[in-house]
Structure formats: structure tokens, C-alpha cells
Image (spheres, rainbow, N blue to C red):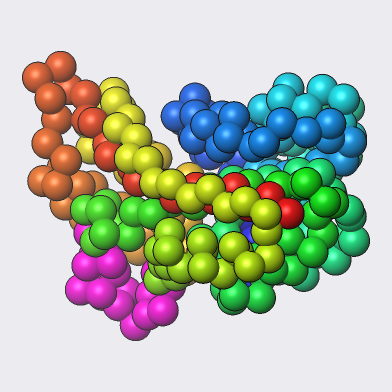
Amino acid sequence: MTTTSTTTTTSDWAARQYVLFENERTRPVRDLIAAIPATDARLAVDIGCGPGNSTEVLLAHLPGAAVSGIDSSPDMIEAARKRLPQCQFDMHDVSTWDAPGPYDVILANAVFQWVPDHQQLFPSLVKKLAPGGSLAVQMPDNLDEPAHRVMREVAAHGPWADQLKGVERTLRLGADWYYGLLKPLCARVDVWRTVYHHPLAGGADAVVEWFKGSALRPFLAALDDAQREAFLLRYRDEVANAYPALADGTVLLPFPRLFVVATR
């Protein structure tokens, strides 16, 4: 899931890299969509739809609705169109998307961590909802996890330090902040946090591959080929120390995520 608002280096995310862990990445959106209050939805949209895996879950949950998707990445949109030719997919920047709605469901799965100014963005999306409609959001909440801490440390202490200043993702707001923002605007706000523990075969290499499809992308996009290889080697060594493999070689990757379902 991508946006071009302030992180243009993430707009070329490769769909193939993202779906290497499709089952693990899709599980949270299943949990999110299951929490949307029942409604006779007629119009729904997946903003930051990625390769269409989240849209597919939304479509199955709302079989009577017209479901569409937007993303800023041409690669992701192409993959989504191949996956779900019955749905409309268009390229848009989430932060400037101006479709009026009204929508019965607006889904945003693992995209808003890249988009600034949530104080303005979330209320603007609520205004696009029909009465009884829901904004359903899931965001990684893992900036304190070793994978991200190591990412920042490798970026700050290598020969590429100047190139990578300001690249890291820093936006992080708590459940109470989102509840306080949305409750005056909505009839119901449900906020929760879940830590998934994903078993990844392949040890540290698998952890690196996971983040190459998401949080590492802005770092890698700012480097040339030789720097990128050196960065990944150093990151892989640090990841191996932070995530020791189990006896069978599997790494259990903890991944906290924040969920919001706000119903107008």
C-alpha cells in the first residue's frame, strides 16, 4: 500500500516483493474488516489498495457493493487490476484523493503510516461516509521493534548517513489520540492493538525480505546498487542478532498493529 504525499521513494514498491508474505500481510485486514458493523453497503473503496489482496477481502465481505481501489504505485495498480478485473482501480495520492462519496465503507490497510497530518485527514474521510458508514484503518505500530531500531541505527552510522537523514518513518500516534479525534465526529469508535507473531522460515534473511517489501523501501531507494547491497548486509547481520532463530530455523517476528473502526 503506497502513497506519494511526502514519501515519493515508496511509490515504486514492487507488488511481487510485497506479496512474498501475502498470507501474513492479509491476516490483519481480515481481522479489521470482520470488525466493521454490519451494513447494507452499496459503495466501498480500498485506499492504498496495493496489489488487491485487501480489496479481495473487502469484496468478499460486501458481495452486494460496488468496490473500488486506489493506490499511487503503477505496479500495485497493475497487479490489482489483474487480480480483480471486476473492480475499478485508479492511481491517486491518498492525501489528495477528492472523491465525494458518500461511501458505506472506506478501508485503509497499512497505508496511513506513510501519510502526514492525520488531524486533517481522518475527519476529511469521515465526511465522505454515508450515515452508518465506517472508516476502517489498520497501521503498523512497530517503530519501537528491533527491526525498525536496527534500520535507523544502520542508516545513521554508515557511509550513507547523510543520504538517509530524514528518510525513516517517524509518525506514531496512540489509540487514545485517534479515539479523541474521531469520537466527536462519529456514533461509534472502536480502537484496538494486536501483536501478531509471524513464523518466518529462513531466519534473518526472511525478516530482511519482509521489510524489503515495506519499511526498507525508502532507505534502499535512496542508495545506489553498491550501497544498497552493503546496507542490506549490515542490516541482515544486526537482524540476526535481534531475532535469533528457533531450533528449526524459523524466526518468530512480532508485529504490533493499531486498528480503528469509526462509524458515522
- The correct choice, above or below, for 55 with respect to 256 in the image is above
> For the point 52% across and 38% down, which residue is it?
17
Left or right? Give the position of 245 relative to 194: left
| The C terminus - image quarter | bottom right
Left or right? Give the position of 194 relative to 262: left
> For the point 22% across and 30% down, which residue is it?
251
Say which of 36 and 55 sits in front.
36
Say which of 160 and 68 sits in front.
68
Label total for image: 0
Magenta residues, start to end: 150-168
Residue 171 shown in magenta = no
* Magenta span main SS: loop
How far from the left and from the top, in percent, is residue 27? 49, 29
- The correct choice, above or below, for 80 with respect to 183 in the image is above
> For the point 66% across and 75% down, which residue is it?
120
Left or right? Give the position of 166 relative to 131: left
Say which of 62 and 141 sits in front.
62
Report whether residue 220 is seen.
Answer: no
Report whether residue 41 is seen.
Answer: yes
Residue 157 shown in magenta = yes
Residue 129 placement: quadrant: bottom right
How far from the left and from the top, in percent, is residue 138? 53, 48
How far from the left and from the top, in percent, is residue 215? 43, 55
